[in-house]
Amino acid sequence: MSVTTIWLLGTLGLAGLEMLTGTFYLIAIAAGLAIGALCSALSLPFSVQIISAAIAALISVAIIKKWKQKNLAAASAPDADDVNQVVTLAHWIDASRARVNYRGSQWDAILAEGETQQNSEYWLICARHGATLIIRSQKS
């Protein structure tokens, strides 16, 4: 078995494992191994193959890390689209928690600080924490 074949088998193995994890980091390392295979196919010395594979893998990981930081920061920004939207009360769970209808489904909701349970059917969203809406009375 040639060295190029070993590099390519490593590349395919990591790419296959990546399908189980979904993090993209194994693909980055697999890209480095592919560069090592290319260097091997060009009959470059083994030390050049190793160094090229390591550099390519490090660059790939750095690119993915930067991309994830940029995209996760945008995704985790507060969802301002929900603020001041009207929800319909489905039912009260206890004194401060309720189920409300919003966007075609029921959501968990808690009263905003200083709010009290009222017989109002319509409430306003003042914040959202994950899948829980923070609501206040429309009269507040």
Image (cartoon, rainbow, N blue to C red):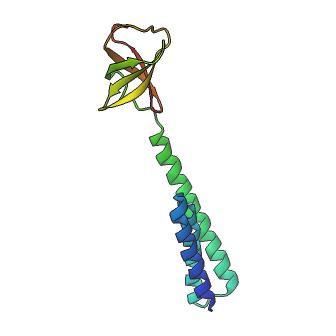
Q: Quadrant of the N terminus?
A: bottom right
Q: Residue at x 55, y 64 (%)?
A: 60
Q: Nearer the viewer, residue 89 or 125?
A: 89
Foreground residue, 111 or 89? 89
| Residue 26 showing in the rendered view | yes
Horizontal side, residue 71 vs residue 89: left or right: right
**Residue depicted at x 47% and y 15%:** 112
The part of the image, by quadrant, that contains residue 123 is top left
Point out residue 133 in the picture as x, y percentages from the top left corner.
43, 25
Quadrant location of residue 82? top left
Residue drawn where x is 32% and y is 28% of the image: 102
Q: Camera-side residue: 129 or 108?
A: 108
Count every numbered label the image shows and give the total.
0
Quadrant of the image containing the C terminus = top left
> Height in image: 134 above or below 47?
above
* Res. 81 visible in picture: no
Q: Using the image, determine if residue 119 lies above or below residue 129.
A: above
Q: Is residue 115 left or right of residue 38?
A: left
Q: Residue furthest right?
A: 47
Q: Position of residue 108 (x, y in %)?
A: 43, 26
Residue 59 at x, y percent in the picture: 58, 64
Establish if 22 lies above or below 77.
below
Residue depicted at 50% across the width and 53% down the height = 67
Residue 138: quadrant of the picture: top left
**Residue 7's x, y, as percent?**
60, 81
